[in-house]
Structure formats: C-alpha cells, structure tokens
Image (tube, helix red, strand yellow):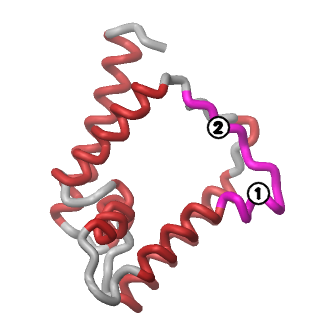
Amino acid sequence: MNLDWNSFTPESALAGGVILGLASALFILINGRILGISGIIGGLFRPRAGDIAWRIAFLLGLLSSPIIFGLWTTLPDARVDADWPTVGIAGLLVGIGTRYGAGCTSGHGVCGLSRLSPRSMIATLSFMAAGFLTVYALRHLAGAA
C-alpha cells in the first residue's frame, strides 16, 4: 500500500484520532465494553440473546462510513501492492494473531493502553516490534522494495 504523502493532512489525522478516542471512552463508559473490533466480530460467532443487534449496527456503521464520507469528498485511491493469495494469507495470519493475542491492535493499542493494561502494553510493544523487524528484514536484508 502506498500513501500519498502530498495529500496527507495532519489535521484530519488528529481529528480522526480524537473521534476514535472519544468513541472508545464513551463506549466503555456507556456499555462497559472495550471497543475492539476483533471482540465485536468474535461476538457474532458466539451469539447471545440481546447481544447481536448492537454488534451488527456497529459493523454496518464501520463499513458504511467511508461510503457516506465519500459523498462529501473524494476518497484517496487505495492500492495494495500484493496479489490476492498474499492478501488472503496475511489476513489469516492477522486473524490468528488476534486470537492468540486476546485482541487486535485497536483493542490493545487504543483501549488497552488508555486503561494502562499491562497485557495491552506487552501486546502493543510486541506487535510494534514485530512490525519493525519485519519491515527491516524485508527491506534491508531480503532486498524487497
């Protein structure tokens, strides 16, 4: 994936971060639940009475928000520099990682760190270190671009 650095606006990134932080805080204050995407999706696979409607509404909002936002502005072009089998394998590895890590990056990085969760601190440091090492190995040791 390539980012168009010429179109990067720190204001919109800051606004998005503030909105995400507020949404996470309100979600835990109002519902007593952590706003982690893997947990929300995972709850759909083991449904309990009265626990499905809000999960579906959340996911519909998550999926429809770029479409609605696109009605007011031009969305940036997204380009993934990988073939479909690579994207599929990567998605499966991320899914396996979220199960073993007891949460995804949003759950640990945003919600867990804000609660000063030791488990989330270790998880966030682990996946950040793994990402740094992977990029270093692929770009500098293996010579991939």
Q: As shown in the figure, which amino acid type bears the numbered disc 1?
A: Gly
**Which residue is at a point 38% across and 63% down the rendered structure image?**
37
Give the camera-side residue of 63 and 6. 63
Q: Is residue 13 left or right of residue 34?
A: right
- Judged from the image, the secondary structure of the residue bearing numbered disc 1 is loop
Residue count near mark 1 (Cα–Cα under 10 Å), binned few <14, some 14–19, many ≥20: few
Q: Which stretch appears magenta?
A: 66-80
Quarter of the image where the N terminus is located:
top right
Relative vertical location of residue 64 with respect to residue 94 in this rendering, above or below: below
Relative vertical location of residue 129 with respect to residue 71 in this rendering, above or below: above
Q: What secondary structure is the stretch in magenta mostly built from?
A: loop
Residue 78's mark? Answer: 2
Q: As shown in the figure, which amino acid type bears the numbered disc 2?
A: Ala
- Judged from the image, the secondary structure of the residue bearing numbered disc 2 is loop
Q: Position of residue 145 (x, y in %)?
A: 49, 14
Residue 55's mark? Answer: none
Say whether disc 1 or disc 2 marks the residue closer to the N-terminus. Answer: 1
**Which residue is at a point 81% across and 61% down the rendered structure image?**
71
Relative vertical location of residue 145 with respect to residue 116 in this rendering, above or below: above
Q: Position of residue 80 (x, y in %)?
A: 56, 30
